[in-house]
Image (cartoon, rainbow, N blue to C red):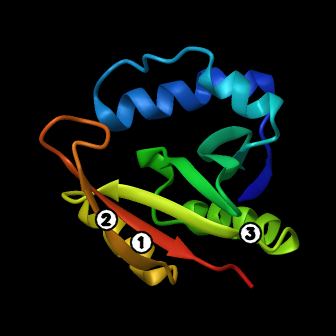
Amino acid sequence: MRVRKGRTGDAIRCIRINDMIWGRKWKRPGYFHERVGEGELIVAEEGGKVAGYVAFRRHHFGDNWYIEELAVHPDFRRRGAASALLKRVERLCARRKAGLLSSTDSKNRASLNFHRKSGFRREGSVRNMFLDGDTEVIFSKKPK
């Protein structure tokens, strides 16, 4: 698994992964291009295919970076892609002495477990943060 900085050509691949996972069309066409332009998209590649990605924002909340999207194509799950992507963001945060924030839907058991196993601390929850009726769980971590 190769982890690298995202490129413009990766945007459509990230959108396809997102559409497949959530079963609905991505509605922000410029989002991934913006993240690439800001250096805030990292992809995991295997066999020349984008296996997953992490999109984040630097200094989104004070000195904390925020993971907005972390997704792995179903064909590449359980191979360490999510952990490798997270480790790359953590290294970048540690260099800047930044904290790291993330969130996930309270019903997403796989993501909740991933955050816990990755050393995130649960900070609380917010109802209707992204979708009406859903509760988003907020996590924090101080990368070393």
The residue identified by callout 1 is 114
Task: Give x and y (percent) for residue 18.
Answer: 44, 33
The amino acid on which the numbered mark 3 sits, given as a three-letter code, is Ala
Q: Is residue 88 left or right of residue 116?
A: right
**Mark 3 vs mark 1, CA separation in Å:** 21 Å
* Dot 3 alpha-carbon crowd within 10 angstroms: few under 14, some 14 to 19, many 20 or more: many
Name the residue that disc number 3 marks: 98
Secondary structure state at the residue bearing disc 2: helix
- For image coordinates 40% across by 80% down, the residue present is 116
Q: Residues within 10 Å of mark 2 (few under 14, many from 20)?
A: few
Placement of the C terminus among the 4 image quadrants: bottom right
Please indicate, yes or no, whether residue 122 appears anywhere in the rendered image. yes
* Amino acid beneath label 2: Ala
- Which numbered disc covers residue 58? none
Q: Quadrant of residue 9?
A: top right
- The residue positioned 48% from the left and 78% from the top of the image is 120
Residue flagged by tag 1: what amino acid is it? Phe
Q: Which residue is mark 2?
A: 110
Local packing at callout 1 (Cα closer than 10 Å; few below 14, some 14-19, many 20+) is: few
Nearest the camera: 85 or 58? 58
Helix, strand or loop at label 1? It is helix
Q: Earlier in the sequence, mark 3 or mark 2?
A: 3
Residue 95 sits above or below residue 121 on the image: above
Identified at 30% across, 23% down, the residue is 24
Q: Which residue is at the front of the view, 33 or 102?
A: 102
- Count numbered badges in the picture: 3
Q: Nearer the viewer, residue 24 or 13?
A: 24
